[in-house]
Image: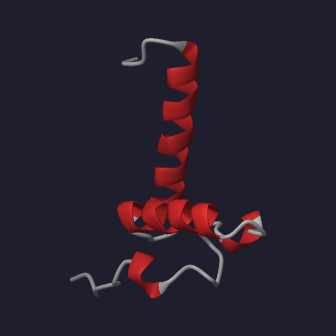
Amino acid sequence: MFSNTQNGATSSSIIYSIIQTAIANELKPMHYLEHVFKQIQLNKDLQISDILPWSASIPETCKKINTPQS
């Protein structure tokens, strides 16, 4: 909708999908994205399974604090 090119629209949809998947897995999207980008940059032998939103290796700083609802 707001992209000037097909490549821009494709890139935007990928990022939006990652953000929504993080939210669905009760993660803080910004912290999760920072973690993923850092891991991609630092770890050349990175396995995709290590950075998926439901991975056990996602740090606690990326996870939302569940508060009881009244």
Q: Is residue 52 left or right of residue 26?
A: right
Which residue is located at x 64 percent, y 68 percent?
51
Whether residue 63 is visible, yes or no, is no
- The structure's colour scheme is secondary structure
Q: Is residue 68 left or right of residue 27?
A: left
Residue 44: image quadrant is bottom right
Which quadrant: the N terminus? top left
Eyeballing the image, is 26 above or below 59? above
In the image, 36 versus 60, the foreground residue is 36
Residue 41: image quadrant is bottom right
Eyeballing the image, is 58 above or below 6? below
Which residue is located at x 44 percent, y 63 percent?
34
Which residue is located at x 74 percent, y 68 percent?
46
Eyeballing the image, is 60 above or below 2? below
Which residue is located at x 35 percent, y 84 percent?
66
Q: Position of residue 3 (x, y in %)?
A: 42, 18
Q: Position of residue 50 (x, y in %)?
A: 70, 73
Whether residue 1 is visible, yes or no, is yes
Q: Position of residue 33 (x, y in %)?
A: 47, 60
Which quadrant: the C terminus? bottom left
Q: How many marks?
A: 0
